[in-house]
Image (cartoon, grey):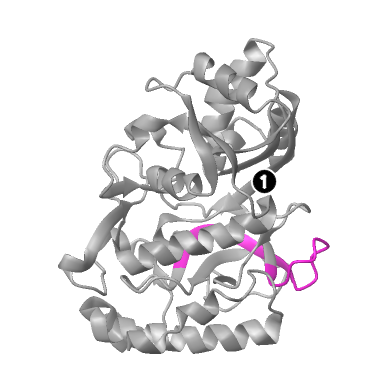
Amino acid sequence: MMRMIDFDTLFTIPPYALKKIEKEQLHKQYLDRLFEHHCNACKPYQQIVRVLGKNPPLPVRLFKKYDLRSTGNEEITKTMTSSGTSGQSVSKIYLDRATSARQTKALSKIVSDFTGKSRLPMLVIDSKAVLKNRNMFSARGAGILGFSMLGRDLTYALDENMNLDWKTIDAFCQKYYGQEVLMFGFTYIIWQHFYQTLKTRNKKLPLKGILIHGGGWKKLSELAVSEDEFRMELISVTQLQKVLNYYGMVEQTGSIFMECECGHLHASVFSDIQIFHPENFEIAEKNEQGLVCLTSLLPTSYPGHILLTEDEGEILGEDDCPCGRMGKYFKIYGRMRGAELRGCSDTYEQH
């Protein structure tokens, strides 16, 4: 069955090149084959299908209650866990070498569409201590590891106590003065441990280039910090030209949704999005808010190709974003009321 899934061809397609009809045809072909593969390889998924029918959207909470894998234990090279507040169970996502490599490759193709092909010097707004166990990764650790492969001269801005490492930061700024750099981190960690410290000390860093951030918007919304304010304030303490958000989850690592220059999140060739009305699970039209369902063509070691999230969102359009990228573009409003709190940086103190 695996021989029928032609991932080599998939990776030859530019991430935002396909229009609606072409993408629908491609996704149907790949999702049909993924469905067959997971039915054959994962007994719990097979049982779910008997009840719900072909390619059902799996609620992400299922990964907290069951070990869902479509490969043997001996093939698992990495287990990733979702973030969760104290007392919550966490999702376990089992990766084999092929799925992990595929997710890393997709992430690189997606992000390079926004940052360019060359690998820039990279400053991670986090602590290296997060990467403790390479075989059992939290969502935060997985995010750092994945994005770190897109840069060079990887440097961590925070020490083990989550304080700014001034000596390291000053050396990085001097080494790359006047050059473009890539910065990455989780939204709330950047705000609390990077921005607020710089603001308090009235310090501005000579860092030019791009900041990519994601996760942890709930805490910022509680502080009444909007996306626009976050962007403007980060630019005010640096010399950054772009501050771009992304949306993604550990259950579909790699096929993230990047924010374009127009402020829209975009689905790439590797992913798609649907919105469901939560009261009857009918598909919502454009500009109608509802429950977010995400598709990824990448996972073969676990049945995570169609997942029902606990987030609320709205599709804004398709193939007509002013940035020129094809595919659906959308907005996320946060967790549905009553859903568990989780986020890569909302629970950073546990990792």
Q: Quadrant of the C terminus?
A: top left
Spot occupied by residue 23 in the image (x, y as percentages of width and height)? 63, 82
- Using the image, determine if residue 135 lies above or below residue 292: above
Is residue 316 found inside the magenta-colored segment of the image? Answer: yes
Q: Amino acid at mark 1?
A: Leu
Can you say whether 246 is above or below 169 in the image? below
Q: Looking at the image, which residue is at 49% across and 36% down?
A: 154
Is the residue 2 above or below the residue 175 in the image? below
Identify the residue position indicated by label 1 in the image.
244
- Please provide percent x and percent y for residue 192: 54, 25
Q: Is residue 137 visible?
A: yes
**Residue 44 or residue 241, whichever sits in front:** 241
Residue occupying image coordinates x 44% and y 71%: 298
**Residue 319 percent coordinates (x, y):** 76, 73
Residue 72 sits in quarter: bottom left
> Is 29 left, or right, of 19 in this rendering?
left
In magenta, the rendered stretch is 308-328
The residue that appears at 35% across and 40% down in the rendered structure is 85
